[in-house]
Image: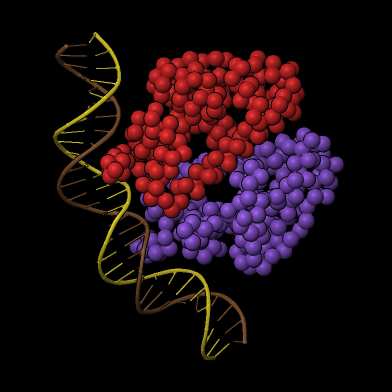
Chain colours: A purple, B red, C brown, D yellow
Amino acid sequence: MQQLFQYFKKFNTVPPEAEAAIASICAIVNLEKNEELQPIGHTCKTIYFINKGLARIYYYKDGIDITESFAFENSIIARVESLFTGKPSRKAIQVLEPTEVVAINAGQLFKLYDRFPEIERLFRKIFEAAYVETVNRIEGMQFHTAEERYRALLNEAPNILMRVPLKYVASYLGITQVSLSRIRSQR
Amino acid sequence: MQQLFQYFKKFNTVPPEAEAAIASICAIVNLEKNEELQPIGHTCKTIYFINKGLARIYYYKDGIDITESFAFENSIIARVESLFTGKPSRKAIQVLEPTEVVAINAGQLFKLYDRFPEIERLFRKIFEAAYVETVNRIEGMQFHTAEERYRALLNEAPNILMRVPLKYVASYLGITQVSLSRIRSQR
DNA sequence: CGATTCTTTTAACATAAGATAAATAATCAA
DNA sequence: TTGATTATTTATCTTATGTTAAAAGAATCG
């Protein structure tokens, strides 16, 4: 849990009582490689923090598995399009390595917002940062060739390419696995 | 200003004093067609609400004008990647019709967050909703052909195609103007 | 109104990426 | 270790989209 509170400090400091309140609505969960953290069709009611390991959000389009995003240790992962709307998610969260997460009960967390404005502010800032990342990703997807997107990933997040099966990376980049392989092979 | 407060009600109700506080940091701005609301290179310190008219966020990639997003009446527009990081934005906001906006001073707004938790909550929810929209847009961009993206736009936001020059729509869809024209011509 | 400028379409050609199938390579379980 | 499964690469062919240039069509303004 210390790891999570360390992470929080990057966004907002909260008083000890607030930390204790958060701790009381968290649970440590351990998963084996490839296990599902959240299934498709379920409304997202949990925010996860990754202590160790790696996860992805994915969904199916026309029967094809598409990776929306990856998350590594010391980061938050949640299906926000469900979390913030209360609608069921067409997406799932899956772990790609043996992974330990802190599961934060979102319903109870949102209740804590009333008691602790610092907690509301903390998560506001966390999701603002995530929002910015998403906006930046759109920019990367507009008018870049598949090769440019691959090279950018190689630069900015080589850990993804080291730890994630290429088939997942391909759909994350918005291309087929065959295309990705072709791009990699040309030197 | 009433229009803005009406919009707010969709997200969170705030007490009259809070409304008054917000009103005190807002200004009405009127712009002519094609005028710039915010220039490239400037750090974003204003959140705009569109009373009437239409605006877009755009930037240049290799000298080519690319539209990141559009905003119509009764919606918020801001360059969040600058607003939330304090870094200068490579993007600009331009109005595409005679437009009236409410300019909200973001620095002062963030100060109001301390005095009025309701205001912090209000804008938290506004940006959460915007975040969800952005995540959904990524989904639309992964593994859809240009034609599918055009048809989807035609369905979901035909007003964009009615009111926005096609050259801007093309880059928004991530394709060239020539491609868009080709897609439109085939019945 | 006519001239200029801006926007959209059309045409011809080049190329990146998709689809399908098959061959390797890597991983994993018995 | 071996066989079976899964992941990755390679090959061939097809197609969507980019590029460039030019023509046609609208909008704007003096």
Is residue D3 depicted above or below A19 in this figure?
below
Query: Could you say where residue A56 lies in the image, as x and y percent from the top left?
Result: 58, 57
Q: Give the quadrant of residue B87.
A: top right
- Residue at figure coordinates x 54%, y 36% from the top left: B81
Query: Could you say where residue A4 lies in the image, as x and y percent from the top left?
Result: 73, 50
Query: Could you say where residue B67 lies in the image, as x and y percent from the top left?
Result: 41, 35
B107 vs B94, nearest the viewer: B94
Please count the marks in the image: 0
**Would you say B39 lies left or right of C28 here?**
left
Is residue D17 depicted above or below B117 in this figure?
below
Q: Give the quadrant of residue A42.
A: bottom right
Is residue A144 depicted above or below D2 in this figure?
above
Is residue B122 depicted above or below A185 in this figure?
above
- Residue at figure coordinates x 57%, y 25% from the top left: B47
B121 vs A28, nearest the viewer: B121
**Res. B91 in view:** no
- Residue at figure coordinates x 43%, y 63% from the top left: A177
Query: Could you say where residue D3 lies in the image, as x and y percent from the top left?
Result: 51, 88
**Would you say A52 lies left or right of B28 here?**
right
Q: In which quarter of the image is the N terminus of chain B?
A: top right
- Residue at figure coordinates x 42%, y 60% from the top left: A176
B102 vs C11, nearest the viewer: C11
